[in-house]
Image: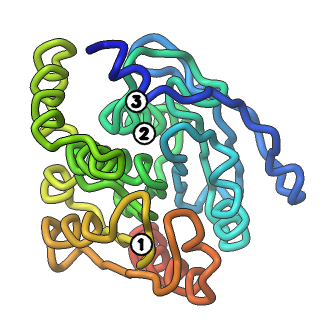
Amino acid sequence: MDSLIGRMYAYEIAPHQVTPEKYNIPFQEISIPANDGGALYGWHIHASPNAPTIILLHGWSRNLSRTLPYIQTLHPMGYNLLAFDSRNHGSSSPMERPTVGTFAQDVVSAVKFLRQQGNTRPIGALGLSVGGGGVINAAGWDDQVRSVITVGAISHPKAVMKFEFRKRHIPGFLASFLFGYMRRQYGLDFESIAPVNNIRKSQAEFLLIHGEEDETVPVEQARALFEAGSPERTRLWIVPGKGHSNCHTHPQFLEKVGEFLEKTLYAVAG
């Protein structure tokens, strides 16, 4: 069973090949202490000491270079930015069995790093896919994350796995058996790391962005997150004609993201 799980979720760990330098954006390479004693490789892009900071997180099997389109969008807006590789991704430390929960732990480590560096300004986060689920969880676990944008975020690890099983024509009862095995064997508590459960615990503001034609994480997962979140603090934008990885190319992306951050980060920054 362990080998089956390993084959299903194996991926190549690939370090970045491009940096912000390609786009003439100055950056500093940093090492963030992880909660297990490892280290997270990251980029710190400074704007102003008085500006809020936005943490950026890639998706499953990717690395921090996947956030470059968002760095290009956010840097001209005057935000400080911190992008990093989650554990067992890119140039960060290895670990066994990463999950959306470990992605979230790494976001919390990034928040701690910023505070230890003397950063007292508001903190936001932007996450992609599993990284989107990670920033939702982090906002539910650490109230210092004030503003959250997700693109193609997962709602629940079980929902992701069930969808993958259906695509591979694997019977549903095997999925249920697998969940039980992973809980017993690895101590995985899927409910505690499910973004759909943690979004309702958070006091952060949320903008959930999801491609209408997403075939990797179905748009139903975005709707589940929206319904679970606070009606006053949760916004949903289903992007017409876009899939899992290209929502940022929509003509309204810059405007919607800019307005959301202006209201939820700069407004509280004063």
Helix, strand or loop status at disc 2: helix
- State which mark lies toward you, 2 or 3: 3
Q: How far apart are the two marked residues, 2 and 3, measured between alpha carbons?
A: 25 Å
How many numbered dots are placed on residues in this image?
3
Q: Is residue 79 left or right of residue 269?
A: right
Residue at image position (58%, 34%) is 85
Helix, strand or loop status at disc 3: helix
| Residue that carries the numbered disc 1 in the rendered image | 209
Three-letter amino acid code at the position of disc 3:
Met
Q: In this view, does 218 lie above or below 114?
A: below
Q: Is residue 74 left or right of residue 229?
A: right
| Residue that carries the numbered disc 2 in the rendered image | 107
| Residue that carries the numbered disc 3 in the rendered image | 8
Say whether marks 2 and 3 touch (CB < 8 Å).
Answer: no
Helix, strand or loop status at disc 1: strand
Residue at image position (74%, 33%) is 29
- State which mark lies toward you, 1 or 2: 1
Res 15 label:
none
Say whether marks 3 and 1 touch (CB < 8 Å).
Answer: no
Q: In this view, does 57 lie above or below 54?
A: above
* Closer to us: 10 or 246: 10
Three-letter amino acid code at the position of disc 2:
Val
First-in-chain label (1 vs 2)? 2
Q: In which quarter of the image is residue 150?
A: bottom left
